Image (cartoon, rainbow, N blue to C red):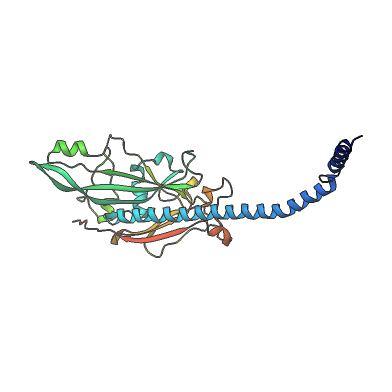
Amino acid sequence: MNPFQWILMNQLKHFKSKQKISGFTLIELLVALLLAFLVITPLLGFMINIMDTDRKEQAKINSEQEIKAALDFIARDLQQAVFIYNADGIKAIRKQLPKYDQKDNYFPVLVFWKRQFIPGALTVGSGTDDTFVYSLVAYYLIKDNDSTWSKAARIGRFQISNGYGLTDAERESTRDAGFQLFDLKDEGDLKTKMNKWTKKTGENYTQDVLTLVDYIDQTSISTTNTAPTCSMGQLIPKYSGSGDDVATGNVITRGFYVCVDSDNTVAEVYLRGNALARIQQNNLNFNQNIEQNKVYFPQASIRVKGRGFLFTQ
């Protein structure tokens, strides 16, 4: 064997011996996996907890913003009110309003008449002129099984308006179906006269109740979600007794309620959202005895005085 062959053989033997001793043993692999598990698992749990907290906080922020926006919208609407129905008024006219056949799912919490400004509505010569119309507005608390919306409740808005124009034909063509103006010539005080309002005979409403905001608290009144009270005016809806001013079925909740003083055209509006309904399908109810639960039900309220100016003989 020449020196070159001897060197080559030694190198091959050395290489094979290194191959045999390289790598990890089974015990070493198991120890490494255990250490990785002990380190990664807490970190993974920590990250999941951060993501879950962030998701809940974002849902809460969204609910707070939507509640505030809805309350601002209702307040601007109410500022034009000339008459606001209290609980007695709701009881008197509820059958004249839409969705009466679905009273367990729809409750007209806030109903009022307003004088609405319409710019440029009239054609006068080669130009236009502004005008006013009377409108009946109703804000509903809604809780049904419509899969388009969340499992929480929502608020819807309904409006019908008088027609406008320079001729009877124009005014009739722009009048919403079912609209009939209140009559102030009847006997009694203003509330008595307004409570006698009826829709236009023989006409069905073509306007629908349109959703204003979703994710309103749907929790039923109970010992952990007690019924509210009013410091002024009448509470709408009522939560006990009988009659069309009492909430029934799915709408026995304080997610949306008002206190109304019809004599002074004043309403206090209360809203409570449900942020939990944005992130989970179950355990959506409010519980006033659990502090960590309450933070996901943002609340807001506002007192609004309408313009009034309805006079009776």
Would you say residue 156 is visible in this rendering?
A: yes
Would you say residue 237 is visible in this rendering?
A: no
Identify which residue, 129 or 259, lies in the foreground.
129
Q: Quadrant of residue 69?
A: bottom left
Q: Residue reaching furthest left?
A: 125
Q: Residue reaching furthest right?
A: 1
Q: Residue at x 69, y 55 (%)?
A: 42
Q: Residue at x 85, y 48 (%)?
A: 27
Q: Quadrant of residue 10?
A: top right
Quadrant occupied by the C terminus: bottom left
Q: Quadrant of residue 86?
A: bottom left
User: Residue 110 in the image: x percent, y percent?
Assistant: 36, 52
Residue 218 in the figure: left or right of residue 31 = left
User: Residue 231 in the image: x percent, y percent?
Assistant: 40, 65
Q: Residue reaching furthest bottom?
A: 231
Residue 222 in the figure: left or right of residue 24 = left
Identify which residue, 210 or 24, lies in the foreground.
24
Q: Residue at x 55, y 54 (%)?
A: 54
Q: Residue at x 84, y 43 (%)?
A: 18
User: Residue 183 in the image: x percent, y percent?
Assistant: 22, 48
Q: Is residue 61 above or below residue 159?
A: below
Q: Is residue 225 above or below residue 19?
A: below
Identify which residue, 81 or 187, lies in the foreground.
81
User: Residue 40 in the image: x percent, y percent?
Assistant: 70, 52
Quadrant occupied by the N terminus: top right
Identify which residue, 301 or 24, lies in the foreground.
24
Q: Residue reaching furthest front?
A: 2
Badge count: 0
